[in-house]
Image: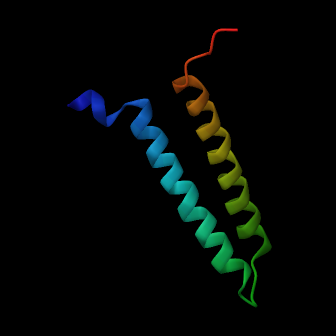
Amino acid sequence: MDSNLHSPQRRLIELRMEHADLDALIDRTSHEVVLDELMMRRLKKRRLGLRDEIARLEHELTPDEPA
């Protein structure tokens, strides 16, 4: 049971959830009149990092297909 808490599949789900939360926050914040450019850059950079980590984990979890 404990190993399930730290499995790559669970980490992938957590990363996807965090990415979706950031995406929603960025969308909401970008429509506001008062815009903090530094905060937006940090949020977008974090979102991009999450996307890269998700892609890396998906690649690790997907078995290579024979040629």
Residue placed farthest to the bottom in the image?
33
Which residue does the image show at 66% across and 53% down from the upper left?
46
Name above or below for residue 38 compared with residue 64.
Answer: below
Q: Position of residue 5 (x, y in %)?
A: 30, 36
Name above or below for residue 14 compared with residue 30.
Answer: above
* Total marks placed: 0
Which residue does the image show at 54% across and 64% down from the upper left?
21
For the N terminus, the image quarter is top left
Residue placed farthest to the front in the image?
67
Q: Position of residue 49 (x, y in %)?
A: 67, 45
Residue placed farthest to the right in the image?
37
Name above or below for residue 67 compared with residue 44.
Answer: above
Q: Position of residue 67 (x, y in %)?
A: 70, 8
Q: Quadrant of residue 31?
A: bottom right
Residue placed farthest to the top in the image?
67
Which residue does the image show at 45% across and 48% down from the upper left?
14
Indicate left or right for 37 with 50 as reference.
right
Indicate left or right for 27 with 13 as reference.
right
Q: Quadrant of residue 60?
A: top right
Q: Position of residue 27 (x, y in %)?
A: 67, 74
Indicate left or right for 2 with 33 as reference.
left
